[in-house]
Image (cartoon, helix red, strand yellow):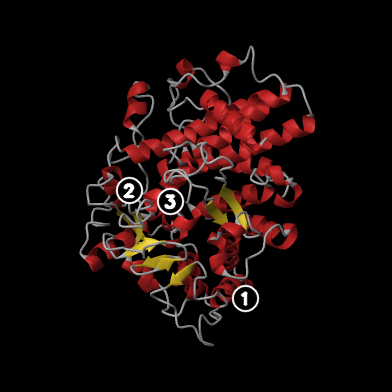
Amino acid sequence: MKNLKIILYIAIFALLTSCDSLDEPSYGKTTTENFYKKESDINYALTGTYLQLRKTWEEYARDHFALGDATTDDAWKGGGSEGDWGQYLELEIFVINSTNGASQRYWQIAYNTINNANNVIYYAPNATGDQQILSRYVKEAKALRGFAYYCLVTKFGGVPLLTEPKLPAEVLTMSRATAEEIYAQVIKDFEDASTLPSRKEYASADAYRMTRGFAKTMLAKTYLFRNDFAKAELVLKEIVETDNDYALLDDYGKNWRKEYENSTESVWEIPNKMYDKNVATGTNVPHFFTSRAGVPGYGGYGFHCPTQNLWDAYDPDDPRLTYIFTNTGDKYTGDTKAQDNSIAPDRFHDYKMTVPSADKIGFNVWLIPYNIRLIRYADVLLMYAEALNENGKSADALNYLNQIRARARNTNPRDPRRDVQIYIPPTSANTLPNITVMDKTQLRNLIWKERRLELAMEGWRRDDLLRQKRFGEVMRVFSVKYNSNKGKYFDDAKHYLLPIPQNDIDRTNGALIQNPGY
């Protein structure tokens, strides 16, 4: 039954995911005569929407991590040489142009998601079947569409706003909506999706569907991007104090072990279960981010490498160091060879995307069963702390900030997945003491730092620096400190946004206007 389901999903994926950009004929109108008529059709269409984020070789997660970290002070692009995967070198050193492949791909994945979601939202109300389930499908699609537009507006600014299926000829005449209009749509979609079931209300077969917790968390992120701390606080209060859908795991390191997939701390993760080792449903993202000099047969491409600057941001006794960095000489239980990071720029690799070879045995090295963790409850608590502090409630903010630090200091500094660990944080009774600072500005800076430490290498650093309006400042300091091109060319008037893909500007005959400076 599971294999049949996977094959069915792949067939649906091939049918529904042919769209690569704004002018591809895949907006639904050509198939409405024989599709989108009943509940099962809508379910298939919704499955196609989810699968936009999992498309083999073009997985959203790869760009989420590489764009979110490798353009910041947290990570280097990595790879076999400076020119390896040049599209990310351009992003890393801010010499990007409008034909950059990574920027185009990010745009395309977002619009593919929007296009498929629009079909669900538009046709589900008139389909036959269980109206309660169909209503839920619409809300799931809105959560996915809201996320796609969040990705677009925070990276590109104002973009074309599509809220229903359109033919290519219609799309090609559309200009950019304003950023304010896109944010309004994002907020509306997440508000509508906030009445989805909680993670606890779904059956196990539906464990990875969109939830009210995801919608509210993304709504809070959107409000923080808008500096609307009052509304962010209200939403976060619901998540933390009313809904009680989530809880921190007792050990930071458990978040990346397979036995804790979709745990109480997981707000959103992309499942990559493989019920049949011969069916291409796994992920290849860990392979891109694993050391090139890895275990024979399982070595990777060596991208997304933590920086020395990130390592130095931690106290030496912080147990989280164990679960963010791998060092040369580390050996995972079951591996036949120790970790070799000799090619990595600062000799570190990304622990959170390292899958021991023992967990890959029998699988295609490119397609392995590893869930991609994208949003954790720790992120929610830190956003709540930030909103409370900005709203003059520093004492309340300390409570949530210190919950994060308490969990970190109680984490096992020895990784149970490794039988050789080169660096073991020397924890003591004085490790990560509670923060007691009440000054609003000082506490803001401490919360921002804790976000960096807690969420390192999880793809959210760029968003934080963007919304905090200090991206350029941080990157120029990094460039000077390390005598590096990384950050040297950052232009505040230009690089807070990515370029609109040139091929879409060309296809619209200038209806789309480029961002300043590109």
> In this view of the protein, can residue 150 be seen by the observer?
yes
Q: Amino acid at mark 3?
A: Pro
Question: In the picture shown, does residue 352 fall above or below 318?
Answer: above
Residue 191 in percent (x, y) is at 66, 44
Secondary structure at badge 2 equals loop
Q: Give the Cα separation between the discs numbered 1 and 3.
A: 40 Å
Question: In the picture shown, does residue 59 fall above or below 429?
Answer: above
Q: Quadrant of residue 480?
A: bottom left
Q: Amino acid at mark 2?
A: His
The residue located at (73%, 31%) in the rendering is 134
Q: Badge 2 is on which residue?
A: 495
Considering every residue shown, the one lying at the far top of the view is: 33
The residue located at (53%, 20%) in the rendering is 166
CB atoms of marks 3 and 2 within 8 Å: no
Residue 328 in percent (x, y) is at 33, 68
Secondary structure at badge 1 equals helix
Q: Amino acid at mark 1?
A: Ala
Labels 1 and 3: the sequence-earlier one = 3
CB atoms of marks 1 and 3 within 8 Å: no
The residue located at (66%, 51%) in the rendering is 213
Camera-side residue: 467 or 333? 333
Q: Is residue 18 left or right of residue 36?
A: left
Q: Give the Cα separation between the discs numbered 3 and 2.
A: 28 Å
Q: Is residue 314 left or right of residue 230?
A: left
Q: Which mark is residue 286?
A: 3
> In this view of the protein, can residue 355 be seen by the observer?
no
Camera-side residue: 159 or 292? 292
